[in-house]
Image (cartoon, rainbow, N blue to C red):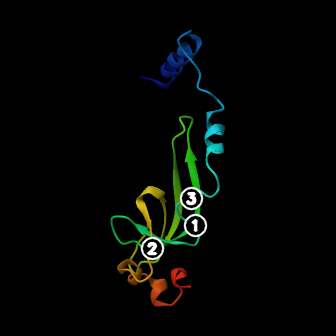
Amino acid sequence: MAYTERARIRRNECESNEYEPQDSGAQQKVQHQRSPNDWRFEAGQCVTHKDQPMPSIVLWRTYTSNALGEGHELYALRSFAFEDDNRDRLMLGKVLIAGVPGSDTCQQCMLNENGLCPGLR
């Protein structure tokens, strides 16, 4: 189906009586439901993946949302594993756990070896 035909169909759906527009204020309602203290992790905190070792530090965080009220915590991480081809990555908060000083994952971190681990301060 060509783009112009899809656009024509969508325009016709919008003009018919069956079309009900989404609540334009829904996203604003979602944003007001979260308080600044609802984060799982703080910037500068050590975290790792829940299924495999990935010693990392939270650089920044944001919250995604849509008109349905669904949203996810999104964290920017810098990996400090000895071998990691992708040092910087974005990860959903639901797949991360807090790093525990002295754990096996902590032992695999370059910051721990150099005495710069924020968890030991």
- Determine the CA span between mark 1 and mark 2: 12 Å
Which class describes the residues within 10 Å of circle 1: few (<14), some (14-19), or many (20+)?
A: some
Q: Residue at x 66, y 38 (%)?
A: 28
The foreground one among 82 and 97 is: 97
- Determine the CA span between mark 2 and mark 3: 15 Å
Q: Position of residue 62 (x, y in %)?
A: 59, 55
Residue type at the position of mark 1 = Glu
Q: Mark 1 highlights which residue?
A: 42
> What kind of element bears circle 1?
loop
* 28 lies above or below 42: above
Mark 1 or 2 closer to N-term?
A: 1
Residue 12, located in which quarter of the rendered image? top right
Q: Mark 3 highlights which residue?
A: 39
Kindly identify which numbered label has been placed on residue 99.
2
Mark 2 or 3 closer to N-term?
A: 3
Quick one: which residue is furthest to the top in this view? 17
Residue type at the position of mark 2 = Gly
Q: Residue at x 59, y 12 (%)?
A: 15
The foreground one among 81 and 71 is: 71
* 70 lies above or below 109: above
The foreground one among 74 and 94 is: 94
- Determine the CA span between mark 3 and mark 1: 7 Å
Answer yes or no: do the residues labelled 3 and 1 have beta carbons within 8 Å? Answer: yes
Residue type at the position of mark 3 = Trp
Answer yes or no: do the residues labelled 2 and 3 have beta carbons within 8 Å? Answer: no
Residue 58, located in which quarter of the rendered image? bottom right
